Amino acid sequence: MAHDVEKWQRRSGARIFAPSTGYRVCTRCIMDTSDPEIVFDEAGVCNHCHDYERRLAGEVYPGVKGKQQLAKAVAQIKREGAGKKYDCILGLSGGVDSTYVAYVTKQLGLRPLAVHLDNGWNSEISVRNIENIVTILGIDLHTEVLDWEEFRRLQVAFLRASTPDSEIPTDHAIIATLYRLAADHGIRWIMDGSNIVTEIMVPATWSHGHSDWGYIKHLNDTFGGAELKTYPHYDYYDYMVRFPHRDRIQRFPLLNYIDFNKMEAMEIMKKELNWTPYGGKHYESIYTRFYQGYILPKKFGFDKRRSHLSCLVANGRMTRDEALAEIQKPALSEEMEREDRVFVAKKLGLSDAEFDGIMNAERKTFWDYPSSERDLPGTKKYMTFIRAAQFHSGDWTRSTAARLNARLISTRTFPARAWRRLRTLHVDPVGTAAALGRFLRRTAGNAGSSLLRNVMKLTVPLIRPVGNWSRRRLSPEQFERFKSFARKLYAGGRIEPDAAPADLKETTQ
């Protein structure tokens, strides 16, 4: 828990947004000290670049290896989906990644169910793109429409909490809906659009807690003013136990198994799906466009374009100079910025004064509020989740079976091991016989001496009268021999020449 407490303090708003001591930018990509946890090596290369290289080597499968891995996965998905209407499920927002995943999934001969979350912020381009995609590819579409008033209150609650996490309500609801529908339809595979190539350089301090229902619920209870009754959600039990182990649902990052080139993918989608670009990553949502293009950079100093462009630089899809030139451009034009501000504030029911108050409020982070990630680890409830995950995943059964088998093998092999030990044991017959003789003599002597001493103890009351009688009747030489014999009997045959029992000494005086 000490490490967790230290992490709370290190990532709290007071630390993250403390005045910076100096500006610095990576010499390889364009990540900079707007990430308060960034670290540079001696060459000025940041930790994000090193992490990118490591994960690219370990989690991305290009070329022949990727095709082989993908073929195995597709064969398994088809085999497990046999006899069902759908063999996989995917989220469809109309953006680049989700659209290309849908396109490739159909190219692989799979039968996906596409799921779209309508949170009330879809742009016209996004709606049109989705219609074109499902029509041209022949994919069934399920649209999950959120209760607008309930969702509006939740988004306002996140804005009032003053953390850089205000897109979590949408992301959490998307994942919850995908898992629920997958379980309802008996689908094991979610074709995931997240990928290493374009998405992994977003710092944890820029947004955190997407799967944390405890965090979401706390912010809503504190700043939302009404209970969430219909909002799709999942908790830590679902995340750790039910989805991955009981329902055995797996997320498959499809784009990590192909040579994903974002620019080429966009050209393919324009040509074959009548897809229209929307100007920025995830800008298919008006709220996302405004939040990432206005609120994040102006209030928190975070520009997510920096991490996305850095991924392209690290992957060789763009030069560092091109990325630096791109980041100097405004995320939104002045006209779009003004229009989006008016539209978003009005749609959320915020006056200009309320919106300005949100923009000027003290900045905080995920770690400033109660959450499941912060408060559950180490508790009994959390340990029950761990044990349940081990049980439902089969880890407990496998480890128990292995332990019992090891004991059984040990029992079965004991006679053989004992015989092998005897065969290899060196025995000296003469030494063994001599040792045995010494043991028997010592044992017999000890037993005889103990018996004699115990018998002689019974004669203690007779020693004085017998001694007095012997001294009167025997000559001095005979009396000395008698005393010596008596002492030896009393000591059980073990007596030093000068030793004598107290009673005998008294009789000789």
Image (spheres, rainbow, N blue to C red):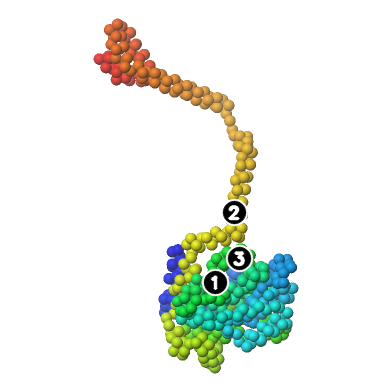
- Distance from disc 3 to disc 1, alpha carbons, whole Å, reads 14 Å
Instruction: Using residue 89 as the reference point, say whether residue 380 is left or right of it.
Output: left
Q: Are marks 2 and 3 in contact (CB under 8 Å)?
A: no
Question: Which residue is at a point 29% across and 18% down the rendered structure image?
Answer: 503
- Distance from disc 2 to disc 1, alpha carbons, whole Å, reads 29 Å
On screen, 221 above or below 384?
Answer: below
Disc 2 designates what residue? 399
Q: Which mark is residue 211?
A: 1
On screen, 29 above or below 73?
Answer: below
Q: Give the x, y percent position of residue 307.
A: 55, 78
Q: Give the x, y percent position of residue 480.
A: 32, 11
Identified by mark 1, the residue type is Ser
Q: Earlier in the sequence, mark 2 or mark 3?
A: 3
Identified by mark 2, the residue type is Ser
The residue closer to the viewer here, 58 or 457, is 457
Question: Which residue is at a point 45% across and 65% down the rendered structure image?
Answer: 3
SS type, badge 3: helix
SS type, badge 2: helix
Q: Are marks 2 and 1 in contact (CB under 8 Å)?
A: no
- In which quarter of the view is residue 113 placed? bottom right
- Visible in this render: residue 63? no
The residue closer to the viewer here, 228 or 362, is 228
Q: Give the x, y percent position of residue 340.
A: 54, 89
Disc 3 designates what residue? 244
Instruction: Using residue 342 as the reference point, say whether residue 137 is left or right of it.
Output: right
- Visible in this render: residue 388? yes
